[in-house]
Structure formats: structure tokens, C-alpha cells
Image (cartoon, grey):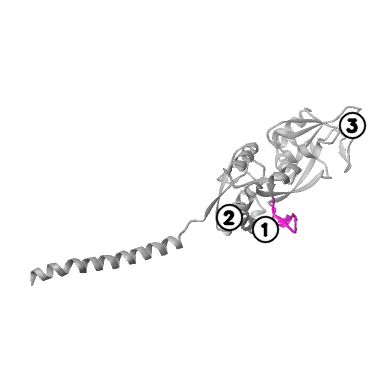
Amino acid sequence: MQALRRLALPPLLWALAGLCGAQASSQANAQSGAEAPPRIWRVCVGDQPILPYITNDPRHPGRAERLLVAAGKLADLSVQLQRYPFRRCRIMMANGDTDMLLAGPTPENLEEFRFPLKSGALDAERRIARLNLVWVRRADSRFDWDGKRITGMPDERTPKVGLRAGQRVSLNAVRQMPVLVDETALTATLQLRMLAAKRFDLALGLQDEFEIALADPELKPLVVLPRALLREDFFAVISQKHAAAQLPMAERLWNAMGKLRDQPEFQRD
């Protein structure tokens, strides 16, 4: 009898082990499916702050940084922000080392990147932000912008305009104008300080950045001209080269940004 029990026991144990193993495998598969992490989506936002949209301070992220992360959650994407010079962001995009970057619709960018579209045109409803490009002058000068040209030059010399280094939208805006360009300022604050020190005649840049910088009492003798040079939308874009593979995820993210962008939490600092 004991011998029969010993012979019968191993098959029984094997059966029980198989049943437990199948249940464990089923539970593991269900758990894995329920907790599958969202796809990582890398966005290169640049390494220079663009206030109030990009702060590069994880403790106090800017409007665009918060919008990208929140839209990623809504689109089931885990957005990871990368911070490199814009030129490097472009190289990373071409090499597939980042999935998205922020850009304005300059002719070069429209050729190189895929923007959110609607009926073949730029879809402004899915932008990151709408920005004004404005002029700033010293209070004691008479420079003005009449919508077509700079006026108020005290003599016949060519006016010098100070731009923020690497701000392509500003450079493109003055490329055909009869002006000299100074692109040595790395920040909007430095740009305005150089203007106050008479390093150039006018500063050109983003209105939001200038208004924040002008809170500095030392810069009070500067005036923002009321007529903007241009108004332009900025977008999160993907590479034309990789668009076929990335477009479904990008469309989800663009749609989410369109739903969230105008909510109060993404409009305040």
C-alpha cells in the first residue's frame, strides 16, 4: 500500500504544480496587460528659458512644459523633456534620438518638420502658444514701427537691431530689412540691458519675455512699441523623415494639447 501511495503521489503533485503554474501565468499576463507603461515620448524643448513657457526649472515648469506633460498623460504617452541647444535638437531629431521639438513655421522648418495640419493648412487650434514679436526702444529715443518700416532715425545711418541669440523667428523677420543685426544676447534680460546701454537702437523679441524682463526697475526707461512686427503660432513638431512611424502618436498628443491649452492652469505662471 505504501509503495502504491509513493507511485501515485508524483503524478498528483505534477498535476497540482501544473494547475498552480497556469493560474500564476494567467494572473501575471493579466497584471502585465493592466499595468503596461505608456510609450516614452521625448520632446526637446531647448536649453534656454523662454518665459513664461519654458523655464528649464523642474521645480517650477513653464506653461509649455506643463502642457506637454499633461497632454502626454491624456494621450497615453510618457513625455520626457530633453534640454539641449536647438541646433542639437535638430540633429537629434534627424537621428531619431528625440521624437518632437518646438518650432515656428519658418520656411526652413516647414520643409524639415511635420506640423499639425487641418485640410492641408497649419492647425492653429493645436498650437503650443501664440506669440507676438515686438520692438523695444529707449524712452529717450524716437524710434517707431509704422507696420512697414522703422521710423524716427535721427540721421541717415542704418539702425542696429538687437536680437536674442538663436531666436530664428526674429532673424527671419528682419532678414530683408535695411538694418544691422546684433545677435550676441543670450537672454531677453541681457538683450534689454544692452539696449539700455546703447549697444543698439532697438530690440526685437517675444512680448511675453520682454514684459517679464521689464519688471526689473533698472530697465524702466525702455518702452515696448504698441504695434507688433508679427504674430506667430509655435508648435510641437515631428520630423518629416520619421513622420510615417510617429504620426499616430503625434496626432494624439496634438489633439490633447488642443483640448488642454486654454484651460486656466496652462495660462498662468
Mark 2 vs 1: CB contact within 8 A? no
From mark 3 to mark 2, how far is it between C-alphas?
49 Å
Neighbourhood count class around disc 2 (C-alpha, 10 Å): few under 14, some 14–19, many 20 upward? many
At 14% from the left edge and 68% from the top edge, which residue is drawn? 7
User: Horizontal and vertical percent for residue 165?
Assistant: 70, 34
Are discs 3 and 1 less than 8 Å apart at CB?
A: no
Considering only order in the chain, which callout, 2 or 3, is on the residue closer to the N terminus? 2
How far apart marks 3 and 1 lie (CA) works out to 43 Å
**Side of 152 where 37 appears, left or right:** left
Q: Which residue is mark 1?
A: 258
Q: How many marks?
A: 3
- State the residue in front, 135 or 103: 103
| Three-letter residue code for mark 3 | Met
Circle nearer the viewer, 3 or 2: 2
Q: Is residue 195 magenta?
A: no
Say which residue label 2 marks.
72
**Residue linked to disc 3:** 153
Q: Quadrant of residue 150?
A: top right
Q: Amino acid at mark 1?
A: Gly
Up-down relation of residue 31 to residue 161 (above or below):
below
Element on which disc 3 rests: loop
Q: Residue at x 70, y 38 (%)?
A: 216
Task: Residue at 77% x, 43% y: name it.
Answer: 133
Determine whether the residue tagged by mark 2 lies in a helix, strand or loop: helix
Magenta residues (range): 115-127
Tell me which numbered mark, 2 or 1, is placed earlier along the sequence. 2
